[in-house]
Amino acid sequence: MRKEGASAAGSERRIVVSGVGAVSGLGWGIEALWQGLREGRTAIRRFQRFDHSGHRTHLAAEVPPPPPDLERWSSSQAGAGRQWSVADRFALAAAAEAFAGAGLAADGALAEAGVFFGSSTGGMWESEGFLAALLAGRRRSIHCLASQQVNGPGDAVARFAGAGGPVQTISSACASGALAADAALQALRSGEVELAIAGGSDSLCQLTYAGFNALRSVDEQPCRPFRAGRAGMSLGEGAAVLVLEPAARALARGARPLAELAGSASSCDAHHMTAPHPRGEGAAAAMLAALADAGVGADAVDFLNAHGTGTPLNDAAEWHAMEEVFGERAARIPLVATKALVGHLLGSAGAIEAVATVLALARGELHPAWSEEGIGGDTADGDAVPALPVSLVVGKPLPVPEARVALSTSLAFGGSNAVLVFRRWSDPAA
Amino acid sequence: MPPTPTGLPQVVISGLGYAGVHGYGRSCLEPALCGGEPPPTSEVDRPAGYHRRRGARRACLADPAGMGPWVAPAEARRMSPLSRLAVAAARMALEDAGLGSARGDGEAGRRGAAVPARGARGQGDWIGDGGDCRRDTAVVVATGFGPSSFSEALLRQILGDGPESASPYLFTESVANAPAAQIAIACGARGPSVTVCQRESGALLAVARGAAEVAAGRACRALVGVVDEISPLVHALLDRFGALARGVPTVGGEPDGSELARPFDRRRDGVVAADGAAMLVLERAADAVRRGARPLARVLAGGSAFDPTAPVTGWGAGHERLGAALRRTLDRAGLEASGVERIVSGGSGARGGDRLEAATLRAAWSGRPLPPVLVPKSVTGEYGGGFLAAAVLAAAGARFGPTAGFAEPDPALGLVPHDGRPLRAPATVLLSSLAAGGAAAWLVLAAP
């Protein structure tokens, strides 16, 4: 028999970010991330994860060893050491920080939460170790592969949180983290969940490092998004997590919202597996749709956290998309390039850039990209790849105490684009 | 067309494409389901060196030759086997939906008429009924293991021959979202492009996501489904984790290659893994009516949950919470449990998985009798889209034979799957799929 009166969707609900957590090349935790970002200190340097002497390039933004208290915490968790991948550990640390920041103990308070996670390679690093041992004729425990699939980090977070709501991992390359936040927003708006954990996690591995080098997409220097002479991306690793919930729920339990996730949208270039549409048509479509979803016009956008990988084609396409959306304002809108400091976190990139955007709105300051001094900049390479006419924040933080609306863009391999719109939190009751 | 109980527009499934062990096209799958025959299996490439000597030997592997009419050679050369399966199934689904001639080959394809050169104007024209809608077509694809054969080949290059030997082509097609991207390129689909990786639950999550995109107006149409390939490495890993059915041991101790999935049977000992793809066309019911399409089913609701008691590679004991989540899913569909006329279960022959599936269904039904339970994975294999395709066919009224592999009820389960007796076409169908690791997903369909 059919029932009458099932609940209607609550699309009008305001969804806020009530907690954030991060692990990146700049360190473990939000404050390590923010301090590094505002100092314009890049984490892209020679790294230790694996022997890169045979690779074409030698830099990455590797997560440093965890502080002792985190190491002890990690070791005390069930399953640690045997079944968690490196990406799982990043995800769990970021999630624990986000829960604490949101005022949610992991015991019981998250029982109905949904988990929406992005990952590009999951436990690929562990798979490589397993396969290398097999190829060398050595035996290795199968347990190192227990969490090797890309859903490993998201599942690990759900298991840790005791979450019983929807859990899904999105693996749409570099847009995964943003698409996960998009999925969380839709689930919250529809009333499917009242609390969502959105984020992403990926670790450095040989497959992506060699793969992007094979495509000649990796810069031999730290990446230089939008600048003259830019010659590719720099890979990074880490995780970022956002706790999302309806504003009314957050306020009722005494949480202090950091920002509002006001809208989101996604699109596909349907153009090429690795090259973006040269005019950034798909990216522009996603930006416009996200703004429409948030109910704000392009003229209301105060700054943009760009995908900004540093590859000549990608940055150019993103610039063209900005021109399409913002018109003559495109060159004046402050542009933030988080990848210049933490590298490209692939499946987690959209999540950590969302966190950087939330922090910028909450703290009224935009972080700079690293200074060009002593790095090269407009050198001989610059003759071949000119700078794009953007207002990139460089050198020192830019105060933006009045900024209200920001975009975070993610443009992926395979042409998948995702855009998030954040709004500075202002309590309507205040 | 009335709205759904959630107030959103009704979404229908108007096309189905299947590329798998039973052939290419739904017409290949229907007789197999009706006959209730176990799937044909093939020997996996064990000399690759990953397998244990006494491990499982066989999987259900799709015949790549069958893709010829659907993926032109000029396209196939830049796709992984996984992408080819996905594009073939997507094109079948479009053709099945009456959305133009979607074939990528045949004489027209070889001449390049049906598949314009990359970037050429008119690409994807065979979606066919208006540029605006084509631009807004979403693609949502689930995959459990991604393009594993390409990942494996690329890693062999990197680890065996050195990083500089890595092939950019292999890398490009080794990403999990390559099949979704190739579908979008092949079809000119410029709406949201999402790849879901949630093991056995991914297929239903993908359908629910696509339906939500269409219902909310974020896409006017969606190509949704699932694709998987069982590479030797994936097969060996599944076997090492004890997931695969074993054949009868021979005198030497090795299985005899007679692996059989026995869902809900007392003797079940694992799944038979399959590669393949199933893709669906979703659109608003009003749009389907407007263009004279004959939908296969209506999508009433999707739902999902997680069992945090589950170990990383197995199933937990959270049937009560999962049962409650399933009831909420039915609630969103506007149904009581008693209103479900058929269950298409993701029971696969996995010991723990089938136990949790049975307990969850019993919990949701509060001990009342279940409607007939169809269990197609013993015909289609686990993974590879067979379950999704079979479930849509069930909602469309296809006849199902006896449950392959089932002979001895397991008294601990309290669930006996369909015995093959004729059933009238159901008005409502519940699809259930619980994944190893804790995820669960459900979908409620109704007759068109």
Image (cartoon, coloured by chain):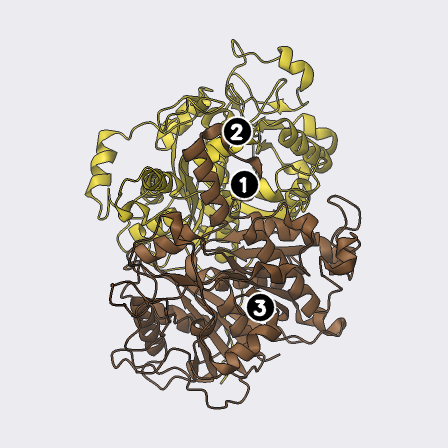
Chain colours: A yellow, B brown
Distance between the Cα atoms at labels 1 and 2?
13 Å
Circle 3 crowding by C-alpha within 10 Å: few under 14, some 14–19, many from 20: some
Q: Is residue B5 visible?
A: no
Tag 1: amino acid: Leu
Residue on which the image places disc 2: A213
* Image x and y of residue B231, in percent: 45, 53
* Residue drawn at 39 percent across, 28 percent down: A62
Residue A403: where, in percent of width, then height?
56, 32
Residue at image mark 1: B170
Quick one: label 3 or label 1, which is nearer the N terminus? 3
Q: Is residue A94 above or below residue B183?
A: above
Location of residue B43 in the rendering, given as x and y in whole percent from the top left corner:
43, 61
Name the foreground residue: A388 vs B91: B91
Closest to the camera, between mark 1 and mark 2, is 1
Residue B23, disc: 3
Q: Quadrant of residue B404?
A: bottom left
Is residue B393 shown left or right of residue B366?
A: right
Give left or right: position of A242 versus A385.
left
As helix, strand or loop, the secondary structure at mark 2 comes to helix
Q: Chain of mark 1?
A: B
Residue type beneath disc 3: Gly
